[in-house]
Amino acid sequence: MINLYTPVSLPSGLPRLSHADRLLLMGSCFASEMGERLTKAKFCCDVNPYGVLYNPLSISAALREIADGSEYTPDRLFHFRECWHSPMHHGDFSSPRADEALCTINTRLRKAHAWLPRLDYLMLTFGTAWVYQSRETGQVVSNCHKLPEFHFTRRRLSVDEIVLDYQSLLAHLWSLNPRLKFLLTVSPIRHIRDGLHANNLSKATLLLAIDRLQTLFPDRLFYFPAYELLLDELRDYRFYADDLVHPSAVALRHVWEQFVHACLSPTALQIMEECEKISKSLYHKPFRPDSEEYKRFLGQIVLKIDQLSKKYPYLDFQKERELCLIRLKA
């Protein structure tokens, strides 16, 4: 039989996540995608409290602020194109009013700060080793917010620079939460604006830095090969979206299924199956919404939710239960 693709061997010894674990995901839009899927699967997640972040130093700086319980003040924002922005945050946090931007930023910061001591896993996705450094402050910014390029110096981080920064960061985080473990990935999304060669150098830098960190902390830091799954196993443009850069829905599903296979516990898989049944039942369109048969159907869903909640008290079915009760009263 002819083998038509090169399978990627998943690393042995990856952590097995359960629904009882608390997760924080940060990094590129690939982290947001995985976080959305984990949240839908009823895992206890906080996802990108700074919005999408692309480079390791910005992710590190954000984590330090979260750990220290930083509070943003007006002097940390700048005004450009009729909006107030934070150079540390994604544009989702920008606002025409400074007080609104600060409220959004600080609300998410306080939540993440309270979450940190209770975390079990921190999942980080590095997107690029290229950074933009403010000429005025020397700070590596997370987002340029379309400021003219002369405001920044563009450079590529070195492997040593990333490793040294993360050695310091990990020591700080472990002093606050000794049981915390890390699962790192490199985003398979190519940054073609840099040029393909520059993108390849960037991804190689990230992979080498993670490999060095794994060697230093083999029992507490792990790598999931999302990058390799798309670039090597799914080596075909049919697995990309129309822009030929972002993964297609099929590719994302494949990476997700490999992640589920490699990183979730047997109990977590069973819970996911039960949750999917409830979701499908709840969003089934009834022929007659006012019929007694449909009300009995909804009652069975509520009963199933209550049974799962009793068995696994860390699951959150509040929205699904409330929706069932609203439909029962209709």
Image: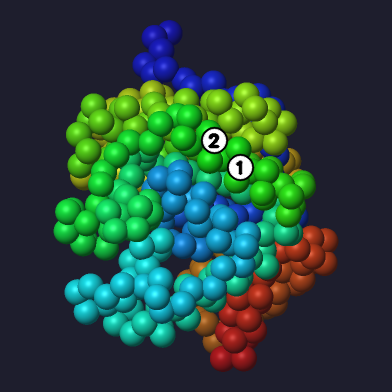
> From the viewer's perspective, is residue 92 above or below residue 184?
below
* Neighbours of disc 2 within 10 Å: few (<14), some (14-19), many (20+): few
Residue at position x 33%, y 45% from top?
131
> Where is residue 150 shown, x and y percent of the image?
17, 54
Residue denoted by label 1: 168
**Residue 278 found in image quarter:** bottom right
Instruction: Judge whether residue 309 can be spotted in this image.
Output: yes
User: What element does badge 1 sit on?
Assistant: helix
Disc ID at residue 315: none
Q: Amino acid at mark 2?
A: Leu
In the image shown, does 138 or 115 lie closer to the viewer? Answer: 138
> From the viewer's perspective, is residue 103 above or below residue 6?
below
Q: Amino acid at mark 1?
A: Ser
Q: How is the image coloured?
A: rainbow
> Where is residue 263 shown, x and y percent of the image?
64, 38
> Where is residue 187 shown, x and y percent of the image?
41, 40
> Where is residue 119 shown, x and y percent of the image?
70, 55
Disc ID at residue 164: 2
Residue at position x 37%, y 16% from top?
4
User: What element does badge 2 sit on?
Assistant: helix
Instruction: Judge whether residue 224 can be spotted in this image.
Output: no
> From the viewer's perspective, is residue 100 above or below residue 264?
below
Contact (CB < 8 A) between labels 2 and 1?
yes
Q: Quadrant of the C terminus?
A: bottom right
Residue at position x 29%, y 82% from top?
96
